[in-house]
Amino acid sequence: MRVVFIGPSYPQEMQQFTRGLAEVGAEIYGVGDSPPSALPRQLRSQLAAYLEVPRLLAEDDVVERCSAWLRGREIDRVESAWEPTVVTAAKMRERWGLAGMSVDTIHGFRDKQLMKQRVAAAGVRVPRAERVVRQPGRDAALADVLADVHAAAERVGLPLILKPIAGAGSADTYACRDAAELEAAIARTAHVRELSVEEYIEGEEFTYDTICVDGEPVYENVAQYLPKPLEARSEQWISPVIITVRELDQAKIQAGIELGRKALAALDMGDGFTHMEWFFTPQGEAVFGEVGCRPGGARLVDQMNYTGDIDLFREWARAVCWKSFEAPTARKYNCGIIFKRAQGQGRITAITGLDGFKQRYAGAIVEDQLSRPGTLRRDWKATLVSDGYLMVRHGDWDTCKQICAAAATDIKLYAE
């Protein structure tokens, strides 16, 4: 099984997906923009060959360079596990006549407005949304955009969400509850070419994650955001929490899973990971948010691994290479991750509350990846991981949630 894998070293978890491919017997041809000498030694040993390209996100240039590099070699699969390169992978498949999801199918996962149209056509409840396109070169571009956004906002209604059509995560995404917040969000998204003006959905927010074979989920996961991602991005003092749900047979969780399965069928999912966000409203309605044909970031795959004591990096590779899944799907734990943000600027100088937390919950802690004193603190608006995280797990939901709350409130990092 000869596999072209785009971006084997970055983001860091891509190295785990590369390992998974190697462990299921793939011959891996890596494509990235890091020089070969910068790749970790273990990663280099897993690659049959590696092509360095000037700009990994220059889709057509990467396709041309790979076509020249691989001329005369037979390739079976082209894979990407990172949102910005999934279209490039699809273009390579079409160029080389390989099996896998097409460019049109991938656009259904990337273009949020097209995504909602296709999912809604399958009878799935989606937020009301409209597309607003900035037209470069027009004389009154800003005025036109303001008028278009305001017109869309009038039709969608406040509160609403303003976000990129082809974004990832919650980057450049803003909740607008009144006219002042809408004006501020328009200014902050001035660099975004295509915007989605979308109905704001009140309620709890969850994920629906799968590994699929021929569009059918062979592994399913649900996790809850505490608080909702947009709220977590609003204040620096918040320690965002995500908890995987052990018991998937709850009525509201099943509503989200049913919704997710319908969405994947509507979007013609093929093989590999998916990551969906959905809402459960106070009225008891499950509402689709958005979905990507790639894994969730911010260590979500690690959380799922701890939930069932399995290796989904390897099982993803098995699914895309051999259309099989061998890990047990029994869920043993609720697994929570707590992201911490240091107070102050500069380098981290102190951590308080950590020792006491570890003494109380030693048996539940599975990872401590907090940044230590001396580390330069990170921009919390640019990365959810921020200044590191703790990962915990417990078989009881309420207990796991309490442990996460203790980590969120009792542990503090300081920088100066």
Image: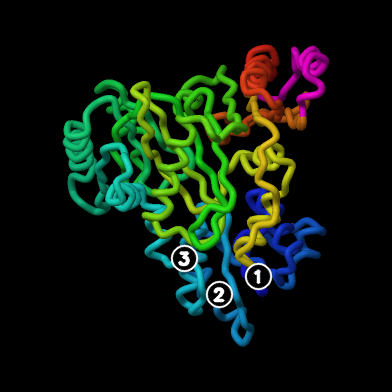
Q: Hey, what amino acid is under mark 3?
A: Met
Q: Which mark is residue 317?
A: none
Q: Which residues are magenta?
A: 343-365
Q: Hey, what amino acid is under mark 1?
A: Leu
Disc 2 element: helix
Disc 2, disc 1: CB below 8 Å?
yes
Going 40% across and 24% down the picture, which residue do you hit? 203
Front position in the image: 124 or 174: 124
Cα separation between marks 2 and 3: 21 Å
Q: Residues within 10 Å of mark 1 (few under 14, many from 20)?
A: some
Q: Hey, what amino acid is under mark 2?
A: Arg
Going 50% across and 72% down the picture, which residue do you hit? 93
Image quadrant containing the C terminus = top right
Going 31% across and 42% down the picture, which residue do you hit? 196
**Which of the marked residues, 3 or 1, is nearer the chain's N terminus?**
1
Which of the 4 image quarters holds residue 252? top left
Residue bearing mark 3: 101
Q: Nearer the viewer, mark 3 or mark 1?
A: 3
Residue bearing mark 1: 51
Residue 66 is left or right of residue 149, and the answer is right
As for residue 351 lying within the magenta part, the answer is: yes
Q: Nearer the viewer, mark 2 or mark 3?
A: 3
Disc 3 element: loop
Residue bearing mark 2: 65
**Which of the marked residues, 2 or 3, is nearer the chain's N terminus?**
2
